[in-house]
């Protein structure tokens, strides 16, 4: 008799998450329901200078996803598709806010598929409440002292405000 074994369905959700927004959190919570394990993959992008280090971003995401048993958070450097393969993931999850996201995301999904035929990309449309939201917009609003409570998990609000103050203090010291 042949023994049937269960294969764990693993997906990654890559991004910079600088910082994690309510839109990111929404995608994480929804994707976690679809897979046995969801790895939130924090990109270390050497071409950008993020507000928070990769370790800080990992800790922030762990803070807001700690209640979800099948979510793991890791940082990575390089191509998402290579990271997915190294984690045993067969799916890359991407969030779409608007039609303008679709062209870029489709191009990336097709490129990833050309490199690794056994890894697929799925797109989750963002909840309408967060369709306009991006980390960049939130950082800009925060830099002008605007209200950011509507955009971020509550645990992240003071962290962003403090980081903006630190940056402003460093700039004023120059």
Image: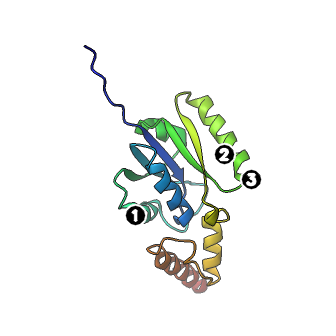
Alpha-carbon span between mark 1 and mark 3: 30 Å
SS for callout 3:
helix
1 or 2: mark nearer the eye: 2
Q: Nearer the viewer, residue 100 or 114?
A: 100
Percent from the top left, x then y, of residue 143? 62, 79
- Report the coloring of the rendering: rainbow
Residue 109, picture quadrant: top right
Above or below 28: residue 158: below
Horizontal and vertical percent for residue 152?
53, 71
- The answer to whether residue 47 of the structure is visible from this angle is yes
Quadrant of the image occupied by residue 59: bottom left
Cα separation between marks 2 and 3: 9 Å
Residue with the mark numbered 2: 105
How far from the left and from the top, in percent, is residue 51?
Answer: 54, 68
Check residue 59 in the rendering and tell me which mark sits there, or answer none: 1
- Which residue does the numbered mark 3 point to in the structure image? 100
Q: Residue at x 53, y 42 (%)?
A: 92
Give the residue displayed 69% in from the left and 40% down from the top: 107
On the rendered image, what quadrant is the C terminus found in? bottom right
Picture quarter with the N terminus:
top left
Which is more foreground, mark 1 or mark 3? 3
User: Compared with residue 128, is residue 89 higher up or lower down, i.e. above or below?
Assistant: above
83 vs 147, left or right, is left
Badge 2 element: helix
Q: Residues within 10 Å of mark 1 (few under 14, many from 20)?
A: some
Left or right: 60 with respect to 21?
left
x and y, in percent, of residue 86 in the image: 43, 37
Residue at position x 64%, y 62% in the image: 128
Residue 21 can be seen in this image:
no
Please name the residue shown 51% across and 75% down the image.
Answer: 160
């Amino acid at each position: 008799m042949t023994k049937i074994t269960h294969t764990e369905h693993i997906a990654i959700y890559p991004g910079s998450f600088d910082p994690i927004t309510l839109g990111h959190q929404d995608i994480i919570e929804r994707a976690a329901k679809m897979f046995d394990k969801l790895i939130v993959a924090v990109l270390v992008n050497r071409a950008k200078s993020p507000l928070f280090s990769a370790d800080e971003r990992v800790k922030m995401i762990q803070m807001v996803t700690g209640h979800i048993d099948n979510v793991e958070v890791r940082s990575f450097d390089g191509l998402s598709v290579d990271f997915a393969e190294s984690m045993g993931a067969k799916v890359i999850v991407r969030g779409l806010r608007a039609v303008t996201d679709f062209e870029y995301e489709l191009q990336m999904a097709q490129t990833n598929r050309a490199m690794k035929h056994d890894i697929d990309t799925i797109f989750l449309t963002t909840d309408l409440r967060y369709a306009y939201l991006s980390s960049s917009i939130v950082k800009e609003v925060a830099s002008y002292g605007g209200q950011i409570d509507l955009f971020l998990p509550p645990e992240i609000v003071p962290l962003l405000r403090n980081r903006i103050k630190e940056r402003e203090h460093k700039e004023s010291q120059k």
